[in-house]
Amino acid sequence: MNNKIKVTVWNEFVHERTMEEVKNVYPQGIHTVIASHLNKVGMEAVTATLDQPEHGLTEQTLDNTDVLIWWGHMHHHEVDDEIVEKVRRKVLAGMGLIVLHSGHNSKIFKKLLGSDCRLKWRESGDMERLWVVKPGHPIAEGIGDYIELEHEEMYGEIFDIPDPDELVFVSWFSSGEVFRSGCTFTRGKGKIFYFRPGHETYPTFYNEKVLRVIQNGVKWAKPLDISPIVFGHAGAVGQGGTYNL
């Protein structure tokens, strides 16, 4: 029996093919770097990209996915609304979702959170220090007090999201801004983790601690064995009532 956590890493995979400065950092794509690490630590990771049929997110792929990881940037508008709705239903049914960096502006993240998810940003190569503010959380396991990235794109508050269920990381940038960088949410039976770092021109996804956070996030977000959620008319408790959805 295969008990490995099944992960699909989704990426636009546009910048790596059209921008030399990005291709030099991630020649095979950000998604392959993340998936390779997850496979090395005993998970079963595959990849999907924007240009594939159904953006690589077919019904069969999603049925075989415990946790979906999402990286997007400039092409959010090209993601088909029907695919977004299909992913949303899967999350509500229990599939985990990890949204990375500029995925904050993706259709799926905004639809699940019900807000614009806007923020302040600046590409100036600031140093970023991600402080662990919930050290007992499983996503922070093995990280220590903080993660330090020599150069990253700055994201600053206000971050237009609902209050997170839990705040695991807070970033401080060398230019002075702060940002809620590790946020968890629950929607239906599904767990969602937003993790801020990961600008495409920096080697962030080669950082061992960043990869460890993603790895921890997958373990945290995997589906739990929870009874089906039912809605609609219900008979009295203990009297054998039926549910009509």
Image (cartoon, rainbow, N blue to C red):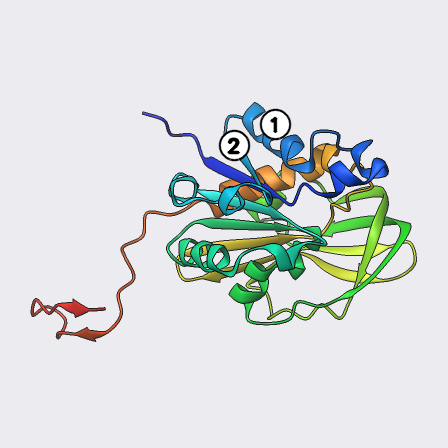
In the figure, residue 242 lies in which quadrant? Answer: bottom left
Q: CA distance from mark 1 to mark 2?
A: 8 Å
From this viewpoint, which residue is outermost toward the left? 239
Q: What residue is shown at x 76% (from left), y 50% (from top)?
A: 130
Q: Position of residue 189 (x, y in %)?
A: 39, 57
* Amino acid on which disc 1 is placed: Ser
Above or below residue 24? Residue 118 is below
Q: Position of residue 119 (x, y in %)?
A: 75, 66
Q: Nearer the viewer, residue 53 or 185?
A: 53
Q: What residue is shown at x 55% (from left), y 40% (from top)?
A: 52
Q: What residue is shown at x 75% (from left), y 33% (from top)?
A: 26
Q: Which residue is mark 2?
A: 45
Above or below residue 230? Residue 132 is above
Which quadrant is the C terminus positioned in? bottom left
In the figure, residue 209 lies in which quadrant? Answer: top right
Q: Position of residue 222 (x, y in %)?
A: 45, 44
For label 1, the crowd category at 10 Å Cα-Cα, with few meaning under 14, some 14 to 19 and many 20 or more, is some
Q: Position of residue 173 (x, y in %)?
A: 86, 55
Looking at the image, residue 80 sits to the left or right of residue 64; the answer is: right
* Amino acid on which disc 2 is placed: Ala
Label whose residue precedes the other's in the sequence (1 or 2): 1
